[in-house]
Image (tube, rainbow, N blue to C red):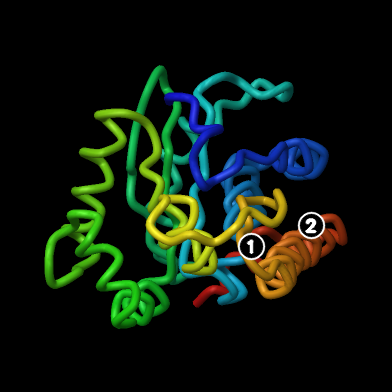
Amino acid sequence: MKNHHNTQEVKLPRQEVWRGLGRHFPDDRECIASFVALEAAEVIEGIKPGNLVSIGGRPQRCGRNLSGLWRRYGGELLAESGLAAEVLAEEDGMILLYFYRPAALDRLLERRSVRVILEKAGYPRPARAGELFDELRKRMKRGGFPHEIGIFLGYPLKDVVAFMGWVAIPFACQGPWKIYGNPLESLQLAFRFRECRCRMASRLASCGTPLDCLRRAA
């Protein structure tokens, strides 16, 4: 997958947290379930419409290959959780997935401001999830992550359009994404995202089964 450090999404070393937890789950199905539960934590709690999750193709320290486990158990885990996932890119055994709650994504796409931005960015009208995913895949093949990816990740729209250069809002600070204008709302949202991740890590660390954590999404 192509480098995307100049896009709205900033890659965080959050998978290091999972590596400390994954060793507690020797069962293959629970192993990949714990990974998905942590990486989709904000989606499971309903705080974000969706999350981008990169599943590596190289063996972990335990010897297991996460992309192989996903291909084996992914459909089953999605059916149990109520989540959905779209493959946006594949390269060298690595899979880039967009995990989302269909109802939450539909609500996002119903917002007039979101429809206007996506239409201006050249996405199909009306905005339907399947067609939007097709367009995202095409854009990623042409050159990495499109700047408007922040819409699908639940970032404040002011930050997305300012990052795209569509409005003249001054840069405020760097959080998990680039923040513009008054940073309070964006920083509060980033804090809520981090809280979701911490709560999920705590549940997994306290010997709760990853499958139960995933079923919260249903």
User: Is 80 on the left-hand or right-hand side of 148?
Assistant: right
For mark 1, does the 10 Å Cα neighbourhood hold few (<14), some (14 to 19), or many (20 or more) residues? many
Location of residue 43 in the rendering, given as x and y in whole percent from the top left corner: 55, 67
User: Is 192 on the left-hand or right-hand side of 100?
Assistant: right
Residue farthest to the right, as pictured: 206
Please name the residue shown 42% across and 22% down the image. Answer: 93
Location of residue 107 in the rendering, given as x and y in whole percent from the top left corner: 36, 82
Q: Which residue is label 2 attached to?
A: 201
User: Is 186 on the left-hand or right-hand side of 50?
Assistant: right
When the figure is inspected, residue 90 is found, relative to residue 50, above or below; the finding is above
Front residue of 39/24: it is 39
Residue 41's disc number: 1
When the figure is inspected, residue 208 is found, relative to residue 174, above or below; the finding is below
Front residue of 66/51: it is 51
Can residue 77 be seen from the camera position used here?
no
CB within 8 Å, label 1 to label 2:
yes
Please name the residue shown 56% across and 76% down the image. Answer: 46
Can residue 106 be seen from the camera position used here?
yes
For the residue marked with disc 2, what is the amino acid?
Answer: Ala
For the residue marked with disc 1, what is the amino acid?
Answer: Ala
Please name the residue shown 20% across and 64% down the image. Answer: 119
Front residue of 115/52: it is 115
Secondary structure of the residue carrying numbered label 2: helix
> Could you tell which of marks 1 and 2 lies nearer the N-terminus?
1
Tell me which corner region of the image, top left, top right, bottom left or bottom right, holds residue 40: bottom right
Location of residue 31 in the rendering, given as x and y in whole percent from the top left corner: 64, 43
Q: Quadrant of the N terminus?
A: top left
Front residue of 24/157: it is 157
Location of residue 163 in the rendering, given as x and y in whole percent from the top left corner: 49, 51
Please name the residue shown 54% across and 73% down the image. Answer: 217
